[in-house]
Image (tube, rainbow, N blue to C red):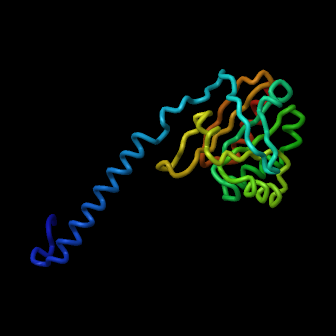
């Protein structure tokens, strides 16, 4: 059954044409966004690359410079979508629960997302997170690393980078759905760095 089911109803025809035009514009805008803006030809940080240098505010409002820890510690830098969401909370609490294991591996945990310093502080206090959370509110660092955007460009990606003391990326794990597996993968790789 194709075509106009009410051929003589002028109101039906006008509303149908309006929604056709609306849908066409939506499809055009969505296609344009996907084509031109999805990952903006970002250079992705790959295994073997030196970690990009950056400075961001931590959950206490202090400026954190990555260069201040390169050469001193192994690093676990994980990008997560949003403070206090179910998956991100599970991931952060899993890192918190294994904090001593990471400490023994001479590793520093750094979480990065686009929320504000105040949001990070509230998140860290609520779940007693004992590691650094950095506020990348302009997604500048996320783009430096080439962290993809998932789910039709609406949800920032969840990616973990393991960096050795020389500042070289030795492992990358990306999974939006397996939030706590990021912790297991990081521990497994760090044990191999000893």
Residue 6 percent location from the top left of the image: 14, 76
Q: Is residue 156 above or below residue 5?
A: above
Residue drawn at 54 percent across, 44 percent down: 149
| Quadrant containing the N terminus in the rendered view | bottom left
Is the C terminus in the top left, top right, bottom left or bottom right quadrant?
A: top right
Total count of labels = 0
At horizontal 15% and vertical 64% (from top left) the residue drawn is 2
16 vs 164: above or below: below
**Residue 18 against residue 103 in the figure, above or below:** below
Q: 137 or 166, which is in the foreground? A: 137
Q: Nearer the viewer, residue 18 or 92?
A: 18
Residue 112: x and y, percent? 70, 44
Q: Is residue 8 left or right of residue 48?
A: left
Could you tell me which residue is drawn at 78 percent across and 21 percent down?
166
The foreground one among 65 and 99 is 65
- Report which quarter residue 159 is drawn in: top right
User: Where is 5 relative to 108, above or below?
Assistant: below
Residue 88 point in image, percent of width and height: 68, 53
Image coordinates for residue 14, horizontal then vertical, percent: 19, 71
């Amino acid at each position: 059954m194709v075509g106009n089911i009410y051929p003589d109803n002028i109101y039906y025809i006008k509303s149908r044409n309006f929604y056709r035009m609306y849908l066409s514009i939506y499809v055009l805008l969505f296609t344009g966004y996907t084509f031109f803006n999805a990952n903006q030809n970002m250079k992705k940080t790959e295994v073997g690359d030196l970690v990009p240098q950056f400075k961001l505010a931590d959950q206490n409002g202090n400026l954190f410079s990555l260069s201040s820890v390169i050469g001193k510690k192994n690093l676990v830098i994980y990008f997560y979508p949003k403070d206090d969401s179910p998956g991100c909370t599970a991931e952060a609490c899993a890192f918190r629960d294994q904090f001593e294991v990471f400490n023994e591996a001479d590793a520093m945990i750094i979480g990065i997302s686009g929320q504000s310093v105040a949001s990070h502080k509230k998140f860290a206090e609520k779940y007693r997170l004992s590691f650094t959370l950095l506020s990348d509110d302009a997604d500048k660092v996320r783009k430096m690393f080439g962290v993809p955007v998932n789910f039709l460009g609406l949800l920032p990606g969840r990616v973990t980078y393991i960096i050795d003391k020389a500042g070289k990326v030795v492992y990358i794990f990306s999974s939006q759905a397996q939030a706590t597996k990021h912790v297991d993968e990081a521990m497994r790789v760090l044990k191999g760095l000893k």
